[in-house]
């Protein structure tokens, strides 16, 4: 399920979003932060809305070692 969606603005190009950020929740209630790159936002902007349930395939993952974490896991 999509718990939260927001857009990060590109400070250099004010009219374009840098990324589409999401907090997703699985059937066990675990949450994970995700993002969609600028080049793919147009494909998912209208489809991924808060509260909707989706099956997501063909994705990549990485450890989040940065200071900003939208969920408590790495």
Image: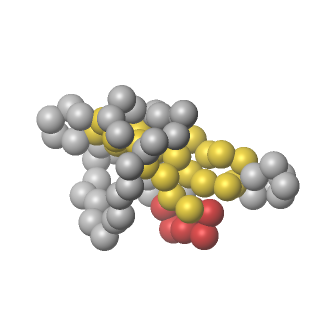
Which residue occupies the foreground of this view, 17 or 68?
Answer: 68
Examine the rendered structure and indicate whether residue 70 appears above or below residue 55. Answer: above
- What x and y, as percent, mark residue 47? 44, 57
Q: Quadrant of the N terminus?
A: top left
Task: Judge from the rendering whether residue 74 lies leftward or rightward of residue 15; answer left or right.
Answer: left
Q: Quadrant of the C terminus?
A: top left
Q: Quadrant of residue 68?
A: top right
Outermost residue toward the front in this view:
65
- What x and y, as percent, mark residue 40? 54, 68
- What x and y, as percent, mark residue 2? 37, 42
Which residue occupies the foreground of this view, 23 or 67?
Answer: 67
Q: Quadrant of residue 51?
A: top left
Outermost residue toward the left in this view:
28
Count of labels shown? 0
Which residue occupies the foreground of this view, 57 or 64?
Answer: 64
Examine the rendered structure and indicate whether residue 47 appears above or below residue 66. Answer: below
Q: Which residue appears at 16% of the width and 40% of the height?
A: 27
Task: Judge from the rendering whether residue 11 lies leftward or rightward of residue 68; answer left or right.
Answer: right
- What x and y, as percent, mark residue 20? 56, 51
Q: Which residue appears at 47% of the width and 34% of the height?
A: 69
Task: Judge from the rendering whether residue 29 lies leftward or rightward of residue 4; answer left or right.
Answer: left
Task: Tell me how the rendering is colored.
Answer: secondary structure
Which residue occupies the foreground of this view, 8 or 47?
Answer: 8
The answer to whether any part of residue 51 appears in the image is no
């Amino acid at each position: 399920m999509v718990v939260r969606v927001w857009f990060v603005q590109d400070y250099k190009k004010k009219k374009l979003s840098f990324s589409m950020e999401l907090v997703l929740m699985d059937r066990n209630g675990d949450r994970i932060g995700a993002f969609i790159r600028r080049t793919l936002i147009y494909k998912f902007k209208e489809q991924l809305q808060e509260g909707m349930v989706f099956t997501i395939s063909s994705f990549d993952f990485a450890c989040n070692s940065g200071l900003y974490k939208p969920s408590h896991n790495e």
